[in-house]
Every structure is written in C-alpha cells, then in structure tokens.
Amino acid sequence: MTRSKFGTRRRAVLLAGLAVAASASLLLTGCGSGQVSSTADTAPAIDGVDTDVAASNGGSFSVRNLTVDFKLDGYPAGSDARLAVALYNNTGSPVTVRVTSPGAADVRLVNPNATPSPTAAAEPTATPTATATPGGETATPTPAAPPPAPAQPGGPAELTIPPAGFVTLNQAQGSFLLLTGLRDELNDGNTVPVVFDFGGQQVTTEAGLAVPLSPVPRGPRVVPDEGHEADVAPEGG
C-alpha cells in the first residue's frame, strides 16, 4: 500500500498548528496566573507584637499589635512614651487587666477626654498673730502650707474587659497607655518589656517602635568624586 505524500504533509501541518496553539494557551495561562496569583489576597503582616495566654477557666487572652509610638530620634532615658495595643478577652467572664513594665517607673492609663475630678480647696494661709511679751507685742508668723504636688498623668493602668470583648488603646482612639520614666533609652534598635496581667495570668512582651506612617526625611545626597571620595552635594543640586 502506497501512502500519499500529501497526507503526510497534511498531518505535519496539523501537528505544527496544535503545537502553536498549545504554546499560546500556556502563555495566556501564565499571564492569568500572574494577575490572580495565590499571593494576591495575602494580607501584610501586622505591625507590632502579638501574643496569647491561656485562661485558667478556659479560653484565652490576647495582646495584639503592641507598639511604642514612632519618634524619629527615639526616647532618651527618663522620658515618657505612648503605647498602642489591642487587648482581647476570649472567655465567658469579665477580666481585669493590669499593665506594668520593669523598663519604666510606671505605666499610666491616660484618657485626655476625661473630666478632671474636683480638688479640695487649699487651706487659707494664716495671718501673723500677736503674742504678749513683757516688752510688748511681737508678731509670730504662721508658716504657709506647701503647695500640693502635681498630679501624675492618667490613672493606674488597670481596666476591665467584658466577656468575649476587646479594647483598643491608642492616641487616635482616645485612651492610651503611657510609659513614664523610661529606665533606658528606647530607639529603633531595642525594645522595652511590658507585662500584662489578665486576672492572675501574666504574659510579658517586648514593645518596639512602630513603623512610621510617612517616609523618614533623608539626609543630603552624597556624590562620589573622581577620587572616589564621597562629597556632599548641595541641597539644590
């Protein structure tokens, strides 16, 4: 039986066409996977520290997104620093949370919108009194009372979270935690320990500076000269 050379040529053309179509399909599939990839819906990592502690009666307590408010030059020792954090009560009972820090003199819960409590009126300063002496009357001044000490900002860092509830503490929300009297400097290279006590269940975390919300200012542009020595270019260059 003799095969036609035209039939063989037709099969070769058909196979070549199928190969071209398969290649085009792969190219289109690749483009589609690039636009709707498996990582397209991946959420970025949350800024800050996250940690959990098991509750003694079941459930758990959570610390979310714990950071120190960003400051370009950091915080020197002895200064105050604001914290931002969200606390969750994943149990069926209310819990009282106390916040302390071995890295600061105190931790205060500050509410700038709270109405200040009335203070007691200062005692009036006594006027000098006259006492009788053989030589006549001598005025004996009564010492004035010392001025009251200035109130610490905020109150003790203690709050109650309802069952299956949460609270967000940051300056934007209103109330926030304030570290007062940092024992060491705090900058982008270190952290400060913070202790959360959920009704007796404690967890210690390390809070670092938050990521800045806007780009950090850059220094002057450096341009190397012909001798490979870096020169600082003028600001207008």
Image (cartoon, rainbow, N blue to C red):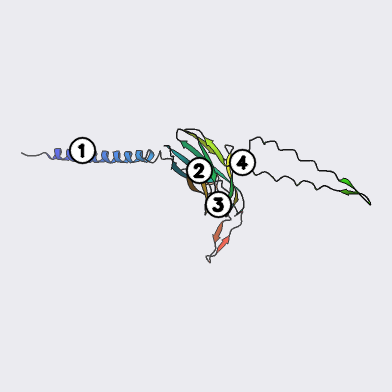
**Residue 197 - label:** 2
| Residue type, numbered disc 1 | Leu
Instruction: Residue under label 4, please give it.
Output: 155
Q: CA distance from mark 1 to mark 2?
A: 75 Å
Q: CA distance from mark 3 to mark 1?
A: 77 Å
Confirm whether residue 44 shows in the render: no
**Residue 14 - label:** 1
Image x and y of residue 228, in percent: 52, 65
Label 4 neighbourhood size at 10 Å, few (<14), some (14-19), many (20+)?
Answer: some
Q: CA distance from mark 2 to mark 3?
A: 16 Å
Residue 129 quadrant: top right
| Residue type, numbered disc 4 | Gly
| Residue type, numbered disc 2 | Asp
Image x and y of residue 161, in percent: 51, 35
Q: Is residue 140 left or right of residue 219?
A: right
Q: Secondary structure at mark 2?
A: strand
Mark 1 or mark 4: name the one nearer the start of the chain: 1
Q: Is residue 193 shown above or below 119?
A: below
**Residue 103 - label:** 3
| Residue type, numbered disc 3 | Gly
Residue in view at x 18 percent, y 41 percent:
12
Q: Secondary structure at mark 1?
A: helix
Mark 1 or mark 2: name the one nearer the start of the chain: 1
